[in-house]
Amino acid sequence: MPHTGYSGAFLDAFPHSLLGGAAPGWDNVPRMPSSSYDNVWMPAGPPDGHGQFLTSTQCLGCHSGGATWRQYAMTLPSGEGSRFIDISPYGTWVSSPMGLAGRDPFFFAQLASETQSFHPEEAALVADTCLGCHGVMGQRQHAIDRMLRGEDCGSFGRHLVDAAPWPADNPLAAMAEAQADAPRNACVQARRAQLNPGMTGFAATFTGSFLLGPADRLAGPYAAPKTWPMQKALGITPVHDPNIRESEVCGTCHTIHLPVLHEGRTLAHVYEQTTYAEWAFSGYRTGTSPDGPLPEGAGPRARSCQGCHMPDTDEAGRKLRTKIASIQEYSSYPATAFIAAPEEIDLPARDGFAKHSLVGVNLFLTTLAQQFPEILGLRSFDTTVGDHAIAPLLVTEKAMLQQAADATSKVTVAPPTVQDGRLRTEVQVSNLAGHSLPSGVGFRRAFLSFEVLDQNGALLWASGRTDAAGRLVDAADRPLEGEVWWTDDRSARTQPEARLHQPHFQSIDRQDQAQVYQDLSAAPPRTAGQQGAAPQCGEGVVPAGPLTTSFLSLCATVKDNRLPPHGLLPKAQRAAIAAALGAGPDLAAALDPVGVGDDPDYGDGQGRDRIVYDVPMSALAGVPATVRARLYYQATPSYYLQDRFCTATGADRDRLYFLAGHANLDGTAIEDWKLAIGDSGRVTVPR
C-alpha cells in the first residue's frame, strides 16, 4: 500500500519548493483516463484504413488465459493454492513495461520537460516523435485518418492521448472517422526522412519508423495457423512470418536516432539509445536479419532478443507446450448447432510458446502501477481470469526479480589483503545481458556498493551508499557531486557548466567516490544572440554545454562507461555490420566508451569491469571482518527526478511528484530507490 502522505525522505530530497507552488494531494492529483476507454473495435465489414490498429480488448477474447471462462488454456500451476499463472499473450503483456508504456508517468513528465522547457519552439515535432513509440497506435492512426481526409500527416499532440468517448460532446470523442483504404505508410516515410536521414534497409526503420502491412493480415510465428476463428471474429487472416522471431522486430523501436535541437535549429542527428545495436555487435548476435546474413556471422553466445525477453520456458527451465488461444472448439465443448468443422476450430498444442513478459529490471514502473492503479487509469482486477489467477503485475514483478537475480550481472570479490596499513581487494562486475548494462534511455544507471563490515555486520566503511531517496552519499550523508542539479527553490542549476558527476574509477580509496555505470551527455552551449558558426555536435565532439536529460539535446557524450556486452566487436567490424543494416559508421562509434581513460576492460571484449578498492585502515572505526560488493540498478536516479520537477509544470509533472512522493518502497526489493542486480556475498578479511 502507498503512503498516505508524502515520504519524509522524499521531501528531504525533493521539497515542495521545487514545484514553485502547492504539491498535489489525494483529492487533486491528476489522473489518467481509465483504461476502459482503451477500446478500438473492428467495425462491420472487411478491415479498412480506420481499422489499421485495434486495441488489446479485441485480442483478449481468445488470447487470454480465461477467455472462455470454461477452460483455462495458456496457464501454469502457481504453487500457491488453487490459483494459476496466466502465461497467455494478453495476461503477460498487459502488465509488462511495454503494456504500460502508454501510461508511464516518467515518460509523460519527460515529455512535459521537452515541450515546455527544453524545446518549446519544436513542441509539436517533439510530441509526435516521442509518441511515435509510446503511443504508436494512436499516433499512426491519427496520421492515417488525416491523410484519408485529404490533409497532411499533422502531429500527434499530448492532448490526444487523453481522448475519451465520454461525454459524447467532448471535442476528442470523434477524433477519427471510418474511411476507405488507407495510405498507411505515407506518413512513416516522412518520419523516416526526418529522423533517419540517409539511412536505408533496416536502419531506415529506426526510431519506430517501421512500415505497416495490410489491415486484414496479422503476422505470427507459427506455420499453418487456424484462420477461421480470427477471420470470423475480426475479418483478419493470421499468416505465418518467421521474421516475427527476429531481433529486428524489437530493434526498430530500441534503436533511437534523434535530431539535436538548439534554438530553432537542427545541429545534428545522434543515437539516443542503441540497445539493438549493442546486441547486434555483441557475442549474442545471431548474424542474421530479415534482409539476409550479416558480416561476422553469429556470435559464440547467439540468442535473439526474444530468447531472453519472451522466454519459452517455465521457471524451472522446462519448454512450454500449449495451445495459443482459448476458443469454443468442436472437440472439447458441448455439441451445438451451426458450429464450424473440427479442422477449422480445433487448436493444436504448440511447441515454442513464448511468454510476452517483455521485462527488463524496471521494477520501479510496475511498483507504481501496483500501488496507484486508479491514478494511472489501470484496472486492479483482471476480468479475464478473475480471482483464479495471480494478478498479472505480481507475475511481472516476479519475472523481473528473476531477471535481476539470474540474467543481469555477476559480482565477485578477490580475496582481500591487509598490508602496509591498507585493506585491498579487486571487485569484478560481469555483464550477463546481451547488450550494454544498463541499456535503453540514457538516464538509467547502475552503481557499485562496496562495504567493509566488522564481525557483527556493522558498517565500518563504504563506497556507493545511498540515502532513502536513492541519492549517492558520502560518510556524512551528503550527496555526492552530480546527485543534485538544482537549488531547492528551483531558481538555478548548480554549476551547470562544470558538468559535475562521478568519473570512471579504476581504483577507489575514499567514501565520497563511487563507481557509477552510466551514459551522461551535454547539451549544446548557449549561443543565443552570438554571431558565428553553430555548435558542433555528434560522436567524438568535446562537451561544451551543461549536462542534460533532454533526449533532443544530446550534443556530446560526457561519460559512457556502461558495461559493454560480452564479445563486443572492434569498431571496424561494428561498422561493417552497421553498413549492412543501412546505417552509417556513427552507429558503430556510438558504442565507444567515453571517459574511461586507459581502462583495459573496455577493449578486451569480456563484458566486465575490474576495480580495486584500497581502503586505509586508519579510516576504520573497528576491526574489519568481511567485505561485500553489490551492484544496484536505478531506473530513475535522483538527479533525473529533480530535473523533471524543475523543468516541467502541469498535470504530468504533478502526477509524477505525487506518485514518487507517496510510493511505499519499505521492505521491497527497490527500497531506497535501488534494485540489487548482483551480490558477491560477504568475503572474509584475513586476520
Image (spheres, grey):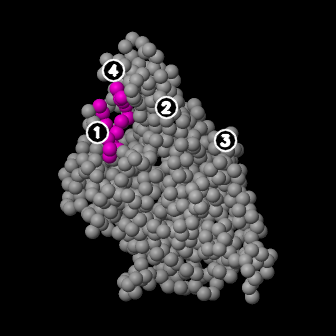
Q: Which mark is residue 622?
A: 4
Residue occupying image coordinates x 33% and y 20%: 622
Earlier-in-chain disc, 3 versus 2: 3
Q: Which residue is mark 2?
A: 681
Residue 158, picture quadrant: bottom left
**Count of numbered marks:** 4
Q: Are marks 3 and 4 in contact (CB under 8 Å)?
A: no
Q: Which mark is residue 301?
A: 3
Number of other residues with Cα within 10 Å of mark 3, as a class: few under 14, some 14 to 19, many 20 or more: some
User: Gap in Å between the C-alphas at discs 3 and 2?
Assistant: 27 Å
Q: Secondary structure at mark 1?
A: loop
Mark 2 residue type: Gly
Please provide percent x and percent y for residue 299: 67, 42
Please provide percent x and percent y for residue 568: 59, 39
Q: Are marks 3 and 1 in contact (CB under 8 Å)?
A: no
Camera-side residue: 272 or 675? 675
Residue 455, picture quadrant: top left
Mark 1 residue type: Pro
Earlier-in-chain disc, 1 versus 2: 1
Instruction: Answer above or below: position of 175 versus 130.
Output: below
Mark 3 residue type: Arg
Residue occupying image coordinates x 69% and y 50%: 318
Q: Which residue is mark 1?
A: 479
Q: Residue furthest front?
A: 81
Please provide percent x and percent y for residue 244: 66, 61
Residue 441 is covered by the magenta coloring: no
Instruction: Answer above or below: position of 241 versus 416.
Output: below
The magenta-colored residue range is 458-475
Q: Is residue 504 visible?
A: yes
